[in-house]
Amino acid sequence: MPKSKRAQVVSLTKVSKKTREHKGALIQELQENAEKWEYCWLFEVGNMRNAHLKTVRKLWKDSARMFFGRGAVMAKALGTTPEEECRTGIHKVGKQIKGQVGLFFTNSEPDEVISWFDDFRPDDFARAGNKATRTVVIPEGPVMQYHSVPPEPFPHNEEPQLRKLGLRTVMKKGVPTLDAPHELCQAGKTLTPEQAQLLKLIGEKMAEFKVRLIARWIASNGEIVQVDNMEISSEEQGGEVGDDAAEDVMSE
């Protein structure tokens, strides 16, 4: 008996590729925003977190438009030569689109934009490959979760994970406990995956999300202004940007 078509298994993890039509629509949207706004900023992100980037979008939703990810599409939309540019002078921004960078369109004055992004630096958990900003020692006694208010000890069922991450814990009255202090990390040393996971579990934040403004294009005269801002180091550039994550930020 032939197999019923209704019995076919469909993987829920399969993601369809973006079509030529989708990319074309995105290029058109970018070019429409280049026509609409007075300034186009090129930026990059340190310690990338999608949640923080979406917070920026939410806070600026009435006075700006942000695009992040798909650098080749953004460069194609703006143009990278005078012959290809969609607005006078904007190809100088398109030429600089490399790596994890984004575009920020707004009518807000440059001083306001620069000041806002200088102040917006939420703390977050460090990742493997980041450098520890301080030495952390877990004291003798019950292993505590400091992100809880007030801090509370880890439950008994998490003791195997703590041991797997390098803690020499023992169970005392059902609580994972250290018989001696444990140095989790040293200031200035690169964090291992185990150290980064332990820091997250106990609630120690060592990373800082920050946006570096690279350049801005001015619609009224077609000029490009390079922004003298602190360079983001290579260990800060990693983050959770996949195609789908980036597309969420770009298309919402």
Image (cartoon, rainbow, N blue to C red):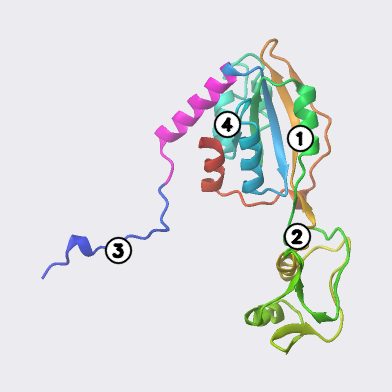
Residue flagged by tag 4: what amino acid is it? Answer: Met
Q: Are marks 3 and 4 in contact (CB under 8 Å)?
A: no
Real-space Cα separation, disc 4 to disc 2, in angstroms: 29 Å
Q: Tag 2's secondary structure?
A: loop
Out of 114 and 4, give the one closest to the viewer. 114
Q: Are marks 4 and 2 in contact (CB under 8 Å)?
A: no
Real-space Cα separation, disc 2 to disc 3, in angstroms: 39 Å
User: Left or right of 26: which side holds 188?
Assistant: right
Q: Position of residue 79 (x, y in %)?
A: 59, 23
N-terminal of the pair, mark 3 or mark 4, is: 3
Q: Position of residue 125 (x, y in %)?
A: 73, 58
Residue position marked by numbered label 2 in the rendering: 129
Q: Is residue 54 above or below residue 143?
A: above
Out of 69 and 83, give the one closest to the viewer. 69
Real-space Cα separation, disc 3 to disc 4, in angstroms: 37 Å
Real-space Cα separation, disc 1 to disc 2, in angstroms: 25 Å
Callout 4: 10 Å neighbours few (<14), some, many (20+)?
many
Q: Tag 1's secondary structure?
A: helix
User: Left or right of 207: which side holds 28?
Assistant: left
First to last magenta residue range = 17-35
Residue flagged by tag 3: what amino acid is it? Answer: Val
State the mark number for residue 69.
none
Out of 180 and 33, give the one closest to the viewer. 180
Callout 2: 10 Å neighbours few (<14), some, many (20+)?
some
N-terminal of the pair, mark 2 or mark 3, is: 3
Residue under the image location 62 percent in, 19 percent down: 37
Q: Tag 4's secondary structure?
A: helix
Out of 224 and 119, give the one closest to the viewer. 119
Q: Position of residue 205 (x, y in %)?
A: 77, 58
Residue position marked by numbered label 4 in the rendering: 74
Residue position marked by numbered label 3 in the rendering: 9
